[in-house]
Amino acid sequence: MKIIIIEDEAPALSRIKKMVYELEPDIEIIATADSIEQAVSVIKQNSQVDLILMDIELADGQSFEIFNLVTVQSPVIFTTAYDEFALKAFKVNSIDYLLKPIDKDELQRAFSKYKTLQKNNSIMDVNQQMQELLFNLKQPSGAYKNRFLVKQGQKLISIATDNIAYFFTQDKLCYVQTNGSSKYVIDYTLDELMGMVDPTLFFQLNRQTIASIACIQSVHTYFNGKLKVELKPSLSNEVVVSRERAAEFKDWLGK
């Protein structure tokens, strides 16, 4: 069996490769990729690969974008550090996913499931279900949120969306920063938040930050085609948009 692994964290990639070889010594890992751009190139060069292990969150965005850029004919096992997002849908649609850190037994079960599907000639059915799922994930799920409820001590605070400058992650927590000086822990992931806010008003700059267009003070060219963004209120960490997302970000700014 020939497989491709798409994973942007080097330690995670090494661990997955080690487990794969321990569980299935005959497997051939023919390629790896750590970004959407590289994954598209690898899949184009190896269109007949048997199976793909694909991390959902990559450095330059969500791996779902890969399916918009290249035809993926192989079944996919998704991996993710998050137990939210559309994982229930993956299960309903018979698409395997593995939560990080990946458990060896879970990986073995995923391989066994693949072999069963292949034996029963059901791979095409699973691929069709995956395409339908990806299509549904892109569709609006209803009106965007106008307010978010956060907790400060024993007090609940309602924040109007138009008073939000940006959302950001820090020390494994997600925060909402208002246009003033206040910030609060918010009980959502950035993935969930991007499905709740109007994408014409908010943009995910990187894996740590979603910004409103009103809070973007300036944008500067950076090395290797990246963009450096200054936010208001300022964020302590440097905010950089990857080269792969720079064009999309500039298009968004110009809408």
Image (spheres, helix red, strand yellow):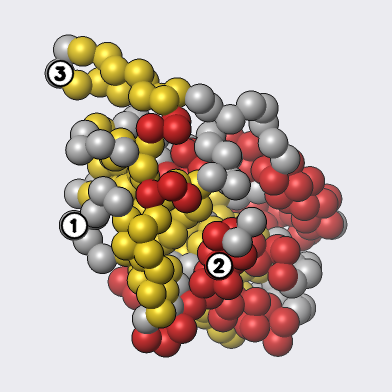
Label 3 SS:
loop
Residue occupying the point 17% across, 12% down: 154
Image: 35 above or below 164: below
Label 1 close to label 3 by CB (< 8 Å) = no
Q: CA distance from mark 1 to mark 3?
A: 24 Å
Q: CA distance from mark 1 to mark 2?
A: 23 Å
Name the side, left or right, on which 101 lies relative to 181. Answer: right
Amino acid type, label 3: Gly
Name the side, left or right, on which 46 lies relative to 217. Answer: right
Task: Measuring from the top left, give residue 219's x and y in whole percent.
Answer: 40, 68
Q: Residues within 10 Å of mark 2 (few under 14, many from 20)?
A: few
Amino acid type, label 2: Lys
Image: 70 above or below 80: below
Quadrant that contains the N terminus: bottom right
Label 1 SS:
loop
**Number of numbered discs on residues:** 3
Label 2 SS:
helix
Of the pair 216 and 57, the residue shown nearer to us: 216
Label located before the other in sequence (3 or 2): 3
Point out which mark residue 250 bears.
2
Residue occupying the point 64% across, 26% down: 143
Name the side, left or right, on which 249 lies relative to 235. Answer: right
Of the pair 215 and 2, the residue shown nearer to us: 215
Q: Which residue is mark 3?
A: 153
